[in-house]
Image (tube, helix red, strand yellow):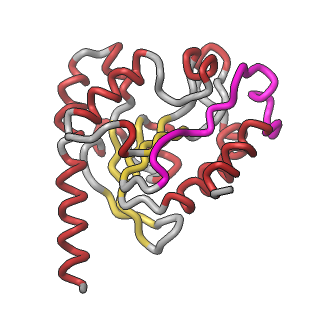
Amino acid sequence: MDELRKIEQEVRQCTGCPLSSDRTNAVPGKGNSKAKVLFIGEGPGKDEDAKGEPFVGAAGKFLTQLIESIGLTRDDVFIANVVKCRPPNNRDPFPEEIEACWPYLLKQVKALRPQLVVTLGRHSMDRFLPGLKISEAHGQAKTYKGLWQPKQVYLPLYHPAAALYDPKKRDVLFEDFKEIPKILKKMANTKEDDS
């Protein structure tokens, strides 16, 4: 069994925090095991809890549009969340819930070895790029300590749900997404220069 399937089974059986008692389904993550881009959201919502997959509700439909706007599909990327079970009433995850899920996310990042980690929303960004403000950092590639290598490239973005409540963020997200292929191209060129 490959590592991602093993992690998925562990997440689905997890009872490591109180969120597990209210869930319909845990939401381990889904996507291409060889993805260059890993998207990390905050936590599952009602639709995700019902289906057991990340980003399948209204925010997920918008995320799909954003991914397709740069010539990729959901089959090209991997999508996960900081917490794997839905917080009640879609409240922000508590620090102890984030800590309980962290080992799973850490294992997923190490198994995937993505070139680029795209954080969606402030809870995801805070986990990887502490001390930044999303309103100032969104759309700007950041190099910070990596989880499977010494340095990792991150791209903090607004959560797609933010555009559902604030239509101005919709255009911002489409613009920020244009950075993803630029970053990947720059990384590919850097690798060629190193060889």
- Height in image: 183 above or below 160? below
Residue for point 64% across, 24% down: 86
Q: Say which of 20 and 53 sits in front.
A: 53
Reply yes or no: does residue 9 show up in magenta: no
Image quarter (top left, top right, bottom left or bottom right) of the C terminus: bottom left
Residue for point 27% across, 26% down: 65
Q: Position of residue 21 (x, y in %)?
A: 81, 24
Residue for point 56% across, 62% down: 110
- Image quadrant of residue 191? bottom left
Is 170 displayed left or right of 14 in the figure?
left
Q: How many numbered markers are drawn?
A: 0
State the predominant SS element of the stretch in magenta. Answer: loop
- Residue occupying the far bottom of the picture: 195
- Height in image: 129 above or below 166? below
Q: Position of residue 113 (x, y in %)?
A: 47, 62
Is 95 displayed left or right of 37 in the figure?
right
Q: Give the range drawn in magenta.
A: 14-33
Q: Where is residue 64 in the image (x, y as percent from the top left)?
A: 33, 28
- Residue occupying the far front of the picture: 1
Q: Position of residue 153 (x, y in %)?
A: 35, 60
Image quarter (top left, top right, bottom left or bottom right) of the N terminus: bottom right
